[in-house]
Amino acid sequence: MKPGEKDLRRLVIKAYHIDHAEYGEENKVDIEGNLTVHANADCFLTRKEEIASVSVKIIRPGEWNVFTNSMMDIIPISTKVLGNIGDGITHTLTGVYVILTGVDVNGVQTAEFGSSEGILKEKLFPGRAGTPSENDFIISFDVTFQAGMGQERHAVTEAHKMCDRFLQEFREQLKKFRGESCTERHEYHDIARPGKKRVLIVKQVAGQGAMYDMHLFGKEPSGMEGGKSIIDMGNMPILVTPNEYRDGILRSMQ
């Protein structure tokens, strides 16, 4: 740093690459790059008055020519090891993403102003910021809502929470990975520069209801637990730091 500058926050993100994914009897990830996905996802279902069933499918690299229901979210598997969102140490998996999709029992897609169901390779551009690359594994977490529930905010929120419980099983294991064994390491600092211009980036987020919502301040990167809806906060402006943004303090539910 230059004289007079102040390091406000230090964030270290350590990545562990996944090379293999398969079905099994539990959610499991190891430091050698192997991921096992629980074949029966209905065990994460708790509120059957809103959600009828859920299924999990592994979409392998090069197999994007498959139908998916309307996409509600694309979620990395990341966890806090030290500190809070925006500082300390975060562990994350590369080579794999989770896509949350939804439809109701009558075939009505989960959407408000337009759904995104269809052949995956025609609906998702690979390699963009926040999207899987063509070489990544995709875990499809597909929710079937009860009739009409795919347009109800409380039901869609429950689907996100259910997927979050599914992800938390991987996160708890990822927390215990040895830091020196990571395949990538990135370090970011929030630097205060007195006397310099102060820059504010304005990001417009969704806050209308159902899948048009935004959760912030979860306990885990891109997580639901402990988070608050921008709707419940009155759609008021919220300040976040650059490192909080990098670390996944926003959970976009659309």
Image: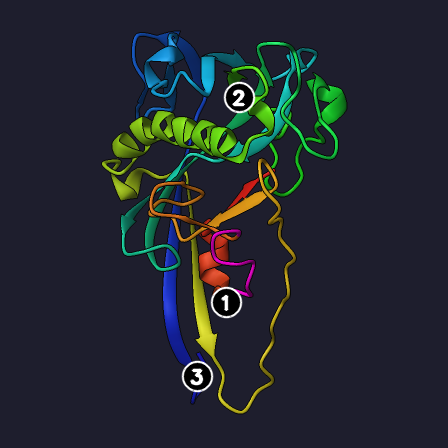
**Foreground: 63 or 222?**
222
* Amino acid type, label 3: Glu
Q: Residue at x 46, y 74 (%)?
A: 191
Q: Is residue 179 above or below residue 189?
A: above
Return the x and y of residue 72 as percentages of the image width and height.
59, 31
**Foreground: 152 or 29?**
152
Say the numbered circle drawn on residue 137.
Answer: 2
Residue underneath mark 3: 5
Q: At numbered mark 1, what does the secondary structure look like: helix, strand or loop? A: loop
Whether the residues at callouts 1 and 3 have beta carbons within 8 Å, the answer is no
Return the x and y of residue 120 as percentages of the image width and height.
69, 19
* Amino acid type, label 2: Phe
Say the numbered circle drawn on residue 64.
Answer: none
Would residue 86 appear left or right of 26 to someone viewing this image?
right
Between the residue at mark 1 and the residue at mark 3, the CA separation in whole angstroms equals 21 Å
Quarter the N terminus occupies: bottom left
The residues colored magenta run: 231-239
* Amino acid type, label 1: Leu
Would residue 186 appear left or right of 210 to someone viewing this image?
left
